[in-house]
Amino acid sequence: MALPKIADAREKTDQQIADRVLEVKKELFQLRFQQGTRRLDKPHQFKHLKHELAQLMTVERERQIKAATQAE
């Protein structure tokens, strides 16, 4: 499984990004829970989900900054 591309995150709407951020955070929680109980099958998913979360939050912040500069 390849790492997600930031172009995919930029194509999403603000609401889709916010929803996906919540989903990824829940998935990371579940992975941490599985790791704690030693039932984690795919440890590489941590990297993929953290990478995707960072991209989504970056795009979200870029849009906030753009909206603030346009409002001035």
Image (cartoon, grey):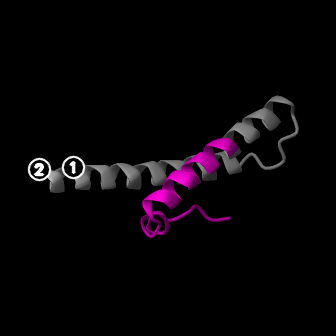
Look at the numbered discs 2 and 1 and tell me whether their residues touch, using CB distance below 8 Å: yes
Q: Is residue 31 left or right of residue 3?
A: right
Q: Is residue 18 left or right of residue 32?
A: left
In terms of depth relative to the viewer, which is nearer, 54 or 65? 65
Identified at 80% across, 29% down, the residue is 36
In terms of depth relative to the viewer, which is nearer, 46 or 15? 15
Q: Position of residue 33 (x, y in %)?
A: 78, 33
Secondary structure mostly seen in magenta is helix
Q: Amino acid at mark 1?
A: Ala
Q: Amino acid at mark 2?
A: Glu
Read off the residue under disc 1: 68
Name the image quarter holding residue 63: bottom left
17 over 37 or under it: above or below: below
Q: Position of residue 37 (x, y in %)?
A: 86, 30
Name the image quarter holding residue 52: bottom right
User: How dense is the environment of label 1, judged by Cα within 10 Å: few (below 14), some, or many (20 and up)?
Assistant: few
Q: Which mark is residue 72?
A: 2
User: How dense is the environment of label 2, judged by Cα within 10 Å: few (below 14), some, or many (20 and up)?
Assistant: few
Q: Position of residue 45 (x, y in %)?
A: 69, 50
Which stretch appears magenta? 1-26
Q: Position of residue 67 (x, y in %)?
A: 24, 54
Q: Is residue 45 left or right of residue 3?
A: right
Q: Is residue 16 left or right of residue 59?
A: right
Task: Tell me the distance, in whole angstroms, between the alpha carbons under discs 2 and 1.
Answer: 7 Å
Identified at 64% across, 50% down, the residue is 23
